[in-house]
Image (cartoon, helix red, strand yellow):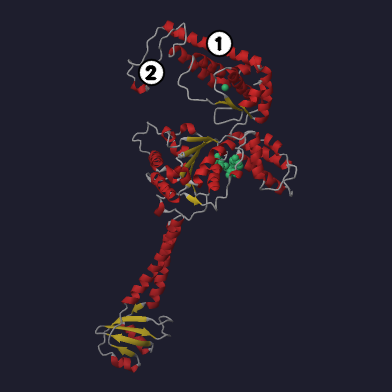
Amino acid sequence: MEKQHKFSIWYVLIGIWIVLILQNFIHSSFAIKTIPYSRFLQLLKENKVAEVAITANQIQGKLKADGTENSRDVMFNTVRVDPEISNLLDQYKVTFKGEIESTFLKELISWVFPMLVFFGIWMLFMKRMAGQQTGFMTLGKNKAKVYMESDLNISFQDVAGVDEAKQELVEVIDFLKEPKKFTELGGKMPRGILLVGPPGTGKTLLAKAVAGESHVPFFNLSGSEFVEMFVGLGAARVRDLFAQAKLKAPCIIFIDELDALGKARGIGAVGGHDEREQTLNQLLVELDGFDPQLGVILMAATNRPEILDPALLRPGRFDRHILVDRPDKNGREDILKVHLKGITTVKNLDTEKLAAMTPGMVGADLANLVNEAALLAVRRNKKKVGMPEFEEAIERVMAGLEKKNRLINPLEKQTVAYHELGHAIVALSLPGTDPVQKISIIPRGIAALGYTMQVPTEDRFLMRKTELLNKIATLLGGRAAEEIIFGDISTGAHNDLARATEIAQSMVKEYGMSSKVGQVYFAQEKKSRFLLTGLEGAVEYSDATAQLIDSEVREIISEQYARAQKILQQHKDVMEKAALLLLEKEKIEGAELKSLMGG
Ligand code: ADP
Ligand code: ZN
């Protein structure tokens, strides 16, 4: 944050002070003193009066330069008492005339001139403050800075380890470079792109790189900045931001921390007109309102997509989601290389070793690490940064990290690796399951320590019984693998168990897929609980049926667990080989595992 000159009461006080000084100065130089007539006579007799003007009942005059009252020419004023004054004036050789010069002008100047000066200073401050978009005159305007390409010298080369995200953004760059060409061909751009990932993985950097690569202005605003002030201002800011952006199109608007602004709107709040909600509504209005042909691309970042208001994620709004995940070992090495360019290191620095030593770190941590190492080298009076500095820097950064996002210990990492491989191998062995795309043991988000990514090849509307059973077996594969390898099981499977049980229950109660229970529908309509009166929704069944349902669900689960175990026993050697690979690389492709299994 740059330093800002806040509007302050001090400016007013200083201004008033300046006016008073000036006024006093001017006034005293033009000042007219009212003196008693006797004093006038005395001054006259002392031969100190230079000239006078006389009317019927007033005398105004000027003292000589060496007059007593002051060193300067002093004007005076007195009431005329003696009607025969001209003789006296003659006697002391004072020039005199019969009318009084108006002092109105001088009085006016002594007030108006300082006022003008003060006003000028005031205007100057106002202009400066308006230029900085702060101060109360500009409250409604957003604080977005316009980064033109010259400022924003960031390209895709500066962002490493997020190749998939970059690939998805190439299209956006093409569009921004020539929006007309794109729309003439009938192409439709997504309006909103949501970058999802943990803090520090380079989401802001990516958005800036898109702007840098396509040479368009970049408007950067944080979600929390929208909601910080008085009621109604957030909405005004959103409106203003979009108005500014439209003028600069093609351009990018980037909203960091979208979750601060876009949290799901609660039902609870009485009145429900809270500031954030108004701002969010305004954002939705703007999102729907702007012409996609215009070339304004809205990008936003969040690390908590699950709490976003669903309205934000609907088609036509933030409908394209790009995952910016923690980097794997290769990614970390690439990121390190980007940041190492900025410092002088020893020639044979082993970046691969560094990457292996920094599991769980994100781009921001790695940038910090390189900086720490460089500082250490300076402190040690070294010309080049070497391995010892990096090792110490890693310790320092890690110590800070451990509090932030628990780093998993080696045994846990092993458990996670076998667990995920269990899912993946079962899925690959059973026909009709979704292809395994990727297996990762990079901790992600709050809950997942690892994940197996299965991507469906097509939209499905019907599922066969065998497919559902295969799905259950795949879900149970994680725990089965743990039991086979370690002879013990962990808590890591609770989510898998919940999902497997849910499917099994649906099979028995909704789809009539259990022969003992029969083709009967026992589930409740999934209506909102608030709408139920207690009569219509409940499906009645006897205790005996309830027991039967339970035992059938259990039967399905245990059968599939046994099946998963059998598959994994058969592929135990593959699982062990793959685990070594996964522990080293932290991420393997589905195809790689498939080839290990022999196609
Ligand atoms: P986010 O917006 O995801 O919280 P930032 O984009 O603000 O993260 O990243 C902060 C800093 O960390 C960047 O300015 C950059 O120096 C460094 N950084 C983060 N990710 C990367 C990356 N993938 N490649 C290179 N540097 C990165
Ligand atoms: Zn699992």
Residue depicted at 48% across the width and 50% down the height: 145
On the picture, is 196 further left or further right than 582? left
- Left or right, 307 with respect to 428, comes to left
Can you tell me whether the CB of the residue at mark 2 lies under 8 Å from the nearest atom of ligand 2? no
Q: Quadrant of residue 328?
A: top right
Q: Is 55 placed left or right of 318 in the picture?
A: left
Percent of width and height locating residue 333: 66, 38
Quarter placement of the C terminus: top right
Count neighbours of disc 1 (C-alpha within 10 A) and say few if under 14, some if 14 to 19, many if 20 or more: few
Residue 407 horizontal/vertical position (percent): 62, 31
* Helix, strand or loop status at disc 2: loop
Question: What is the spatial separation of the Cα atoms under label 2 and label 1, in whole angstroms?
Answer: 28 Å
Q: Secondary structure at mark 1?
A: helix
User: Which residue, given by chain and number where applicable, does mark 2 sit on?
Assistant: 525
Q: What amino acid is labelled 2 in the image? A: Glu
Q: Amino acid at mark 1?
A: Glu
Q: Residues within 10 Å of mark 2 (few under 14, many from 20)?
A: few
Residue 89 at least partly seen: yes
Viewer can see residue 221: no
Return the residue nearer the eye: 547 or 16. 547
75, above or below 566, in the image: below
Vertical side of 477 occupied by 234: above or below? below
Quadrant hosting residue 573: top right
Which residue is tagged 1?
Answer: 559
Quadrant of ligand 2 in image: top right
- Mark 2 and mark 1 lie on one chain; the one further toward the N terminus is 2
- Point out residue 239 in the picture as x, y percentages from the top left corner: 39, 46
Instruction: Where is residue 278? Give x, y as percent.
Output: 38, 40
